Image (cartoon, helix red, strand yellow):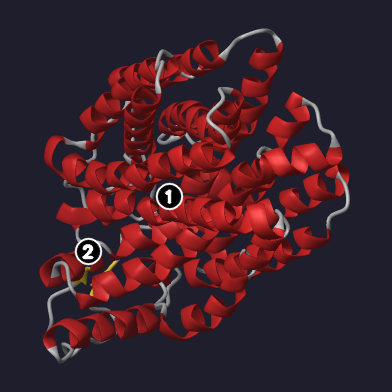
């Protein structure tokens, strides 16, 4: 007779395997497509603004409308996925943002574009928290920080691909063709439907132990060539929580953790979306030309991938809290250095540094989000925190346009973003609880 075990124990015993990387890359490609469809706006802003005669604030808001959808879509997707499953919501979100991006090709004015980008944002926002949560529930405990953080590197890779496509497509075919390219991920949905597995943690939390055992058996066959003789009753789940959904993440056990994570994600998103949304246009205004400015932004995003890949590895060594503090402190320093860059090579070096550090900081927060909540409402917590962060992301590009209209130049605009970076570090220093080495099932009573 098999001893009762937790799902995390099974995953930890199997370690990193072909199955782990199958899930990782299947979800990663969804995020890559997601990143492309989000970031393509930043590379088409100058052309759209010129065609429709937009003000600076309107131009900045082109990158913000999708964030409004990201906020709403992510929040509702998190709540729903805790009820109907991670896989179903991920498939739906991928299909939604692809089809809606296609419709932007036909937009004739600013108002239509804004409405469509909000709708696209529903799909984009739904994808991100579900992806992070699903990866965390398949990763071994000692490597969970790496997989949960580094999955965001695919999202940044989507930004890079968007820049490359725009560089070659926009000057020849115009900005609209880029949105046709953004519709291609609709075909990828079929692959997800056939090859992506549902989280066994979620299945067990819903009393669907037989299905959870089936997923575990598939994992074992992939790694060892055969599965153990599992029977219903062999898997152990924590006792059911007192509450679920939004009520649970704002209960006495989780309230402070939720508030602190929301503040940090707000500030971090304000920085990253504000800088990435405006950088190509800021560099054009600084006199570097369209192609060179796009190349700088692409290079920054390319090196941003390094930040997302490295941060989780470091977090698994020094802890999540210290990692986040270091990430956002260095982001503040790098942003100031970029603001004072005076020549092309200084801009390149400091721009790369900003890309690495700010994505190191934001990606480094992903383990904190997934490890703060129970399986029954984990994605609700992750989605709620990220949705609040989207408000910061929405404000970032608009705020950058506003401070420029007030008279701040390139340097002043960049220094503006150093302040929220430091706020992230301070909140992490004072309030964040360390979660390194804790199994997913151990997250029951979290106090900050």
| Residue 403 in view of the camera | yes
State the separation of the CA atoms marked 2 and 1.
29 Å
Is 64 displayed left or right of 362 in the figure? Answer: right
Identified at 19% across, 46% down, the residue is 313
Mark 1 surroundings: few (<14), some (14-19) or many (≥20) residues within 10 A: many
Tell me where residue 184 appears, x and y as whole percent. Answer: 60, 72
- In the rendered image, residue 326, in percent from the top left (x then y), is placed at 25, 25
Q: Residue at x 40, y 39 (%)?
A: 300
Q: Which mark is residue 156?
A: 1
Compare residues 353 and 213 and report the one nearer the observer. 353
- 227 vs 322, nearest the viewer: 322
Quadrant of the rendering where the C terminus is positioned = top left
- Tally of numbered tags: 2
Quadrant in which residue 238 is drawn: bottom left
Sooner in the amino-acid sequence: mark 2 or mark 1: 2
Q: Position of residue 86 (x, y in %)?
A: 48, 66
> Residue drawn at (52%, 50%), measured in percent from left and top?
163
Position of residue 384 in the picture relative to residue 367 (left or right): right
Q: Is residue 229 above or below residue 311?
A: below
SS type, badge 2: helix
Q: Nearer the viewer, residue 284 or 204?
A: 284
Residue found at x 61% / y 59%: 169
Local SS, label 1: helix
Give percent across and percent down for residue 68. 69, 41
Q: In which quadrant is the N terminus drawn? A: bottom left
Contact (Cβ within 8 Å) of mark 2 with mark 1: no
Judge whether residue 78 can be spotted in this image: no
The circle drawn on residue 358 is none
Q: How many residues crowd mark 2 within 10 Å: few (<14), some (14–19), many (20+)?
A: many
In this figure, which residue is indicated by the disc labeled 2? 8
């Amino acid at each position: 007779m098999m001893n009762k075990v937790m799902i995390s124990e099974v995953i930890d015993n199997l370690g990193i395997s072909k199955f782990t990387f199958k899930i990782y890359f299947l979800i990663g490609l969804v995020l890559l497509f997601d990143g492309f469809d989000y970031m393509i706006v930043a590379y088409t802003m100058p052309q759209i603004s010129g065609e429709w005669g937009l003000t600076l604030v309107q131009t900045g808001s082109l990158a913000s409308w999708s964030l409004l959808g990201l906020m709403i879509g992510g929040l509702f997707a998190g709540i729903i996925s805790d009820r109907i499953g991670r896989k179903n919501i991920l498939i739906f979100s991928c299909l939604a943002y692809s089809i809606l991006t296609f419709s932007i090709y036909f937009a004739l004015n600013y108002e239509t574009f804004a409405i469509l980008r909000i709708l696209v944002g529903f799909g984009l926002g739904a994808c991100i928290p579900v992806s992070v949560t699903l990866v965390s529930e398949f990763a071994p405990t000692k490597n969970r920080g790496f997989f949960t953080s580094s999955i965001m590197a695919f999202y940044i890779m989507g930004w890079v691909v968007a820049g490359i496509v725009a560089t070659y497509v926009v000057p020849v075919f115009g900005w609209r063709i880029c949105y046709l390219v953004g519709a291609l991920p609709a075909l990828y949905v079929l692959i997800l439907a056939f090859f992506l597995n549902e989280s066994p943690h979620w299945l067990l939390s819903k009393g669907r132990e037989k299905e959870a055992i089936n997923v575990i058996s598939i994992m074992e066959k992939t790694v060892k060539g055969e599965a153990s003789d599992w029977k219903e009753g062999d898997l152990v789940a924590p006792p059911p929580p007192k509450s679920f959904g939004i009520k649970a993440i704002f209960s006495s056990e989780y309230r402070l953790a939720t508030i602190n994570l929301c503040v940090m994600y707000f500030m971090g998103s304000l920085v990253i979306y504000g800088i990435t949304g405006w950088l190509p246009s800021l560099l054009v205004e600084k006199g570097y030309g369209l192609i060179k400015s796009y190349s700088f932004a692409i290079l920054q995003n390319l090196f941003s991938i390094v930040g997302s890949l490295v941060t989780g590895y470091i977090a698994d060594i020094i802890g999540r809290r210290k990692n986040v503090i270091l990430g956002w402190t260095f982001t503040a320093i790098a942003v100031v250095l970029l603001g004072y860059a005076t020549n092309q090579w200084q801009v390149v070096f400091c721009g790369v540094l900003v890309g690495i550090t700010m994505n190191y900081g934001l990606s480094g927060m992903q383990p904190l989000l997934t490890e703060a909540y129970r399986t029954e409402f984990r994605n609700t917590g992750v989605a709620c925190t990220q949705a609040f962060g989207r408000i910061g992301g929405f404000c970032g590009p608009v705020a950058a346009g506003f401070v420029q209209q007030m008279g701040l130049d390139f340097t002043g605009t960049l220094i503006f973003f150093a302040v929220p970076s430091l706020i992230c570090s301070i909140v992490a220093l004072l309030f964040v609880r360390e979660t390194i080495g804790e199994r997913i099932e151990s997250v029951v009573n979290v106090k900050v």
